[in-house]
Image (cartoon, grey):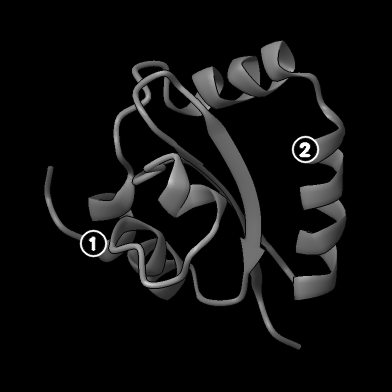
Amino acid sequence: MKQGFVYVMANSRPTLYTGVTSNLVKRVYEHKNNTKKGFTSKYRLHKLVYFEICETIESAIIREKQIKDMNRVNKLRMIALLNPTLKDLYNLILGKPE
């Protein structure tokens, strides 16, 4: 079984995007570098502000749907528990010091 990740990308407003992937480093890199046209490139959502590790990709998809069903205030509260300053967590997942 493949591990999955749920993540939230943001810009400075913050506009939020929730996604799911089996390769978090690769997917965030794609968002940061606008390698694919879409919502995150259009609104310049280049900061990884939240992520969860799930046992399987299927459980990650279920969690993604739960997060997408949240209203904006509850999403921001959830993010603030892990990342109150909305700093970019990309270096954390790369294992680099801040």
Say above or below: 80 vs 97.
Answer: above
58 vs 73, left or right, is right
* Callout 2 secondary element: helix
The residue identified by callout 1 is 95
Which residue occupies the foreground of this view, 44 or 76? Answer: 44
Q: Which residue shows up at 42% across the image and 16% down it? A: 84
Specify the quadrant of the image occupied by residue 86: top left
Disc 2 residue type? Ile
In the picture, the quarter occupied by the N terminus is: bottom right
Which residue occupies the foreground of this view, 42 or 23? Answer: 42
3 vs 65, left or right, is left
Specify the quadrant of the image occupied by residue 83: top left
The residue identified by callout 2 is 67
The 10 Å Cα crowd at callout 2, few under 14, some 14 to 19, many 20 or more, is some
The answer to which of marks 1 and 2 sits earlier in the sequence is 2
Q: Which residue shows up at 38% across the image and 69% down it? A: 30
Residue 94 at x, y percent in the picture: 26, 64
33 vs 8, left or right, is left
Q: Calculate the distance from the C-alpha at mark 1 to the C-alpha at mark 2.
A: 26 Å
Q: Which residue shows up at 73% across the image and 69% down it? A: 55
| Marks 1 and 2 close (CB-CB < 8 Å) | no
Q: Choose mark 1 or mark 2, whichever is in front.
A: 2
